[in-house]
Image (cartoon, rainbow, N blue to C red):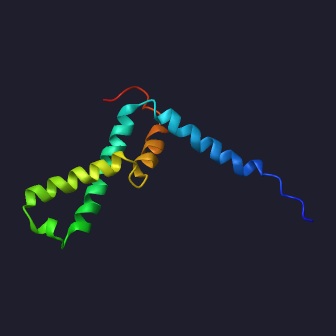
Amino acid sequence: MIAPVPPNPALAAPAATATAAPAAAAADPAIREAAEGFEGIFMTMLVDEMLKGTKVAEGNPVYAGLMTQKFGDQLARSGGIGLADVLERQLGSIPPAAGGAS
């Protein structure tokens, strides 16, 4: 019988640091809002491309644009493709500029 391989602590360390970053980023709701906004724009562009050539795109362009925008925003708020989470981690890990903004 083959003995089981013990867990490698070196592989477990990155997972621990990866889960700590969102907690620090979650402290600033402006970062989360900006990340979701960006993902909403991206998802709106994807939905718009997906709907080209359908009856929705052939209708009133104002309503079609509003529908794709709201649908893209809702997709981002409900988890989307995870882009907002990645952006939030990246933006949350940047320390504020020293000396303030000029």
**Horizontal and vertical percent for residue 92?**
46, 38
Question: Residue at left 35%, top 33%?
Answer: 30
Residue 66 as seen in the image, left or right of residue 45:
left
Residue 98 as seen in the image, left or right of residue 23:
left
Q: Is residue 22 above or below residue 59?
A: above
Q: Quadrant of residue 44?
A: bottom left
The quadrant of the rendering that contains the N terminus is bottom right
Residue 70 as seen in the image, left or right of residue 18:
left
**Horizontal and vertical percent for residue 50?**
26, 67
Question: Residue at left 14%, top 59%?
Answer: 64
Question: Residue at left 9%, top 65%?
Answer: 59
Residue 22 as seen in the image, left or right of residue 34:
right
**Horizontal and vertical percent for residue 82?**
43, 52
- The residue at the far bottom in this view is 53
Q: Nearer the viewer, residue 40 or 56?
A: 56
Question: Residue at left 46%, top 34%?
Answer: 26
